[in-house]
């Protein structure tokens, strides 16, 4: 049988990543991070796009080398089509187009959020269909019912900020570097969730984090007026309190989704699923409700091309290819 070998590129935000998959097995997954955004307190699109241009060739070379695969072995090239920053996506799409054209191989477009969910199929144990997946990243917060590798129904989504944004924006308010999620996670381990922040009252399975953000801002302003060193003196407790509230908002909706659908196969995905409290709490909730819980390895939570490669593997089997006229500028719906 002919081997199916796919090179995948991920460049939707600030990480440039390349991975190689052979017959459904990940052979390499290389990521170049862009530390440069720390200085700005968030991702600067123009800077991200330029950094992708610098990183893409070395990262692709590294991924091919680690996998011991030659360009001539490739069956297809996959890339993140969206959602993401336009200038960042364009680097990956253009690279994929040029390579596909020169090698005369097909191209596969991949939806970044779908890929976060399919990261669960990289390693065992794998969830059984249908399962619920809470996907929480810097740009997205959603609960989907996953009916097959390529069929999803979104049951709930954020109406304003994403969960990762809630972490990152809080971090900015208390003077932490970007991305603040992992730093808050670490500091919270030394703190106590003694400050009670607001819980949004949103119908159904949708999420909202903008009220929480305002609540945190007002809380800090009030306390800093009384003690100018309030943040420094209470940093760990503030982190623990904010994290506890974000995790409880996420898990309340996940619990509701399981109750509504009767589905007990439960997965979490995306950058925020690296959060240690979320990982712990979802396990505890799972024990209470008899859930089978699926949590990706840390390297497959944050942005990576292995998840793009995994999704492309399923699309290759259905010959879901795209032509050279593909552009991230066009409206994109899956
Ligand atoms: O999936 P991802 O790498 O990129 C997007 O698709 O957005 O997610 C990045 C987000 C950032 O907001 C970052 O602060 C958050 O994931 N994050 C975390 C942790 N690790 C990454 N948030 C909380 N705790 C963590 N350990
Ligand atoms: Zn992501």
Image (spheres, helix red, strand yellow):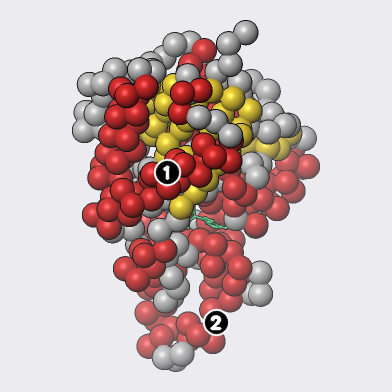
**Residue 201 horizontal side relative to residue 236, left or right:** left
**Distance from the alpha carbon under mark 1 to that under mark 2:** 29 Å
- Rendering coords of residue 290 (x, y %): 77, 35
Q: Identify residue for label 2.
A: 234
**Quick one: 331 or 108, which is closer to the camera?**
108
* Residue at disc 2, secondary structure: helix
Q: Quadrant of the C terminus?
A: top left
Q: Quadrant of the N terminus?
A: top right
**Quick one: 327 or 59, which is closer to the camera?**
59
Give the class, few, some or many, for how many residues have Cα within 10 Å of label 2's Cα (few <14, many ≥20): few
- Identify the residue at horizontal 55%, vertical 31% (top origin): 69
Label 1 lies in ligand 1 vicinity (Cβ under 8 Å): yes
Identify the mark at residue 292; answer none if there is no mark. none
- Rendering coords of residue 245 (x, y %): 55, 59
Picture quadrant where residue 102 is located: top left
- Identify the residue at horizontal 77%, vertical 42% (top origin): 288
* Residue at disc 1, secondary structure: loop
Q: Identify residue for label 1.
A: 140
Give the class, few, some or many, for how many residues have Cα within 10 Å of label 1's Cα (few <14, many ≥20): many
């Amino acid at each position: 049988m002919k081997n199916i070998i796919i090179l995948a590129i991920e460049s939707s935000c600030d990480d440039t990543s390349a991975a190689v998959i052979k017959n459904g097995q990940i052979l390499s997954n290389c990521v170049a991070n862009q530390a440069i955004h720390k200085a700005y307190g968030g991702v600067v699109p123009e800077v991200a796009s330029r950094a992708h241009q610098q990183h893409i060739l070395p990262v692709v070379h590294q991924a091919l080398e680690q996998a011991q695969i030659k360009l001539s072995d490739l069956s297809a090239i996959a890339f993140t089509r969206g959602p993401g920053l336009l200038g960042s996506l364009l680097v990956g799409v253009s690279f994929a187009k040029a390579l596909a054209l020169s090698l005369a191989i097909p191209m596969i477009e991949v939806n970044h959020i779908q890929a976060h969910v399919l990261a669960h199929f990289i390693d065992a144990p794998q969830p059984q269909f249908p399962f619920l997946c809470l996907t929480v990243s810097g740009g997205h917060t959603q609960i989907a019912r996953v009916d097959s590798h390529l069929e999803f129904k979104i049951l709930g989504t954020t109406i304003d900020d994403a969960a990762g944004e809630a972490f990152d924006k809080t971090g900015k308010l208390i003077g932490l570097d970007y991305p603040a999620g992992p730093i808050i996670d670490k500091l919270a381990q030394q703190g106590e969730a003694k400050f009670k922040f607001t819980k949004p009252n949103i119908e159904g399975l949708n999420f909202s984090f903008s009220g929480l953000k305002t609540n945190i801002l007002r809380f800090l302003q009030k306390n800093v007026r009384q003690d100018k060193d309030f943040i420094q003196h209470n940093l760990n407790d503030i982190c623990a309190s904010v994290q506890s509230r974000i995790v409880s908002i996420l898990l309340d909706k996940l619990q509701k989704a399981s109750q509504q659908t009767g589905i007990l196969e439960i997965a979490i995905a995306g950058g925020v699923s690296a959060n240690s409290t979320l990982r712990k709490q979802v396990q505890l909730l799972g024990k209470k409700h008899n859930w089978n819980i699926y949590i990706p390895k840390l390297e497959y939570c944050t942005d990576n091309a292995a998840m793009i490669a995994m999704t492309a593997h399923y699309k290759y089997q259905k010959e879901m290819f795209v032509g050279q006229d593909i552009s991230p500028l066009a409206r994109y719906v899956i």
